[in-house]
Amino acid sequence: MKKKTILLLLVFILALAMGCTAVQPVQNSPQERASEQTAKQAATYENISADQLKEMLEKNDLQLIDVREPDEYQAGYIKGAVLIPLGELEQRLQEISKEKPVVVYCRSGRRSAEAAEILIRNGYKQVYNIQGGILDWNYGLEKPLKISNTAFYNIAA
């Protein structure tokens, strides 16, 4: 009986000792937390309105990417835009500079949000998505010069 009591007492002391030495989570310093927050903020894109894009086009040197399909682009595009359909974006990233802001748009903003995510994942820092897409653009559209039934070119850009 004494042996059982001593054994139970030892198990209890051992369990208590283990509980007291449990691993505590590491607390980051305020500077580390601020740095992590800044990194998270830097790794996101910003939704902008069509009106904000209009202002940016007047003031900034930026890259405007239309991620719609060629037939949609042919119906009209925002002046200065380069067509890179969403399905081709990852294979054509080398055409987009990481040194300049990038604005992406589509018809309504859904595909361009996806494109913005792709750009962020690939190291682009200044990425903007036109929320509402070309449907919200009220400043006129350009039309590409149609050369044949299958080819068209933007000679104004």
Image (spheres, grey):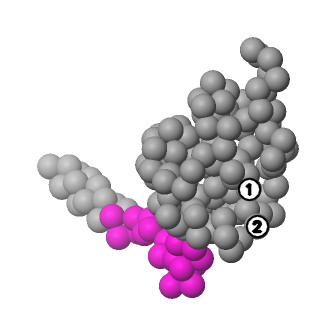
Give the residue displayed 73% in from the left and 62% down from the top.
62
Which range of residues does the magenta coloring cover?
19-38
Q: Residue at x 57, y 62 (%)?
A: 53
Q: x, y percentage for residue 31?
A: 57, 84
Quadrant of the rendered structure where residue 102 is?
bottom right
Mark 1 burial class by Cα count in 10 Å: few <14, some 14-19, many 20+:
many
For this orientation, the residue located farthest to the bottom is 30
Residue 63 percent coordinates (x, y): 74, 56
- Residue 33 falls inside the magenta stretch: yes
Residue 110 in the image: state x and y as whole percent: 47, 40
Residue 117 vs residue 36, the one in the foreground = 117
Name above or below for residue 110 compared with residue 33.
above
In the image, what residue occupies the spot 71% across and 71% down? Answer: 60
Considering every residue shown, the one lying at the far top of the view is 149
Give the secondary structure at mark 1. Answer: strand
Q: Which quadrant of the figure has residue 44?
A: bottom right
Is residue 44 visible in the rendered image? The answer is no
Q: Which mark is residue 61?
A: 2
Mark 2 nearby-residue class (10 Å; few <14, some 14–19, many ≥20): few
Residue 2 pos. (x, y %): 18, 54
Residue 117: numbered disc: none
Name the residue that disc number 1 marks: 63
Q: Nearer the viewer, residue 87 or 108?
A: 108
- Of the pair 7 and 66, the residue shown nearer to us: 66
For the residue labelled by badge 2, is the local secondary structure a helix, a strand or a loop? loop
The amino acid at mark 2 is Asp
Left or right of residue 51, residue 82 in this image: right
Q: Amino acid at mark 1?
A: Gln
Q: For marks 1 and 2, give the CA distance.
A: 7 Å
Left or right of residue 51, residue 12 in this image: left
Asked if 123 appears above or below 150 in the picture, the reply is below
